[in-house]
Amino acid sequence: MSWTDERVELLKKLWSEGLSASQIAGKLGSVTRNAVIGKVHRLGLSGRATTSRVKSHRPRKRIATNAVKRTARARFPTNGNPTVRELYATGEPYVAPIEEMDIPEAQRKSVETLETCSCRWPVGDPQNQDFYFCGGKAVPGLPYCEHHARRAFQAPAPKRRERENAEVVRAAMARVEGERRTPVSEPSDA
């Protein structure tokens, strides 16, 4: 396809009328939108008639300079893995043992014998013959048993607001625990 004088004149006319490059390509036929854009650029055509599609911008509301600015919150807050969160619901931080947990021989698994519900915690050096996986019952949604999940996943650091209210929460939890332990006596009909 070559740009004849007639086609160039028609391009200029349609461009000045405000048609889009796709619309012009459709009217000219056998030419792509990108070819129209390239030709317009090479011809140096810039001024376009405004179309009814182009809307004028609405003026923005002015924000008072002494207004209190709100802090932006994350649109999608990350709450972490709910299964891991349940492990730390007790609030007891993991304390690493001096030695590795003693795993019975019958529970130990090799790569070939691992199942979907088996703990995948590696024990030993994979280069050695005595390497194995824990093989205990995995926590649903996690690859490890409860003991190894507490080792693998650290509890998320409390947010500032949570740290400020931590004492209140601990006191409330202690009160609830105290109520659970105290048997509820039935009122007597004396």
Image: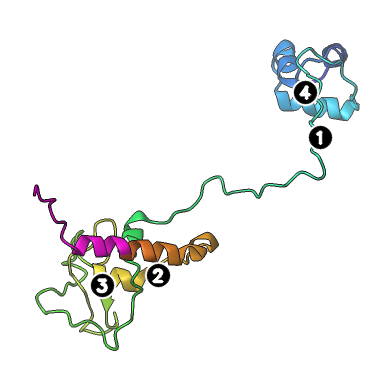
- Distance from Cα at disc 4 to Cα at disc 2: 59 Å
Q: Which residues are magenta?
A: 175-190
Secondary element type, mark 3: helix
Instruction: Using a 10 Å C-alpha cutoff, classify the residue at mark 2 as few (fewer than 14 neighbours), some (14 to 19) or many (20 or more).
Output: some
Q: Earlier in the sequence, mark 3 or mark 4?
A: 4
- The crowding category of the residue bearing disc 1, from other C-alpha atoms within 10 Å (few below 14, some 14 to 19, many at least 20), is few
| Secondary structure found at label 4 | helix
* Residue marked by disc 4: 36
Identify the residue at horizontal 79%, vertical 31% (top origin).
61
The CA span between labels 1 and 4 is 41 Å
Task: Residue 180 in the image: state x and y as whole percent.
Answer: 21, 60
Contact flag, marks 3 and 2 (Cβ < 8 Å):
no
Q: Amino acid at mark 3?
A: His
The residue drawn where x is 79% and y is 38% is 63
Q: Is residue 149 visible?
A: yes
Q: Which residue is mark 3?
A: 147
Q: Would residue 4 be found to the left or right of residue 127 on screen?
A: right
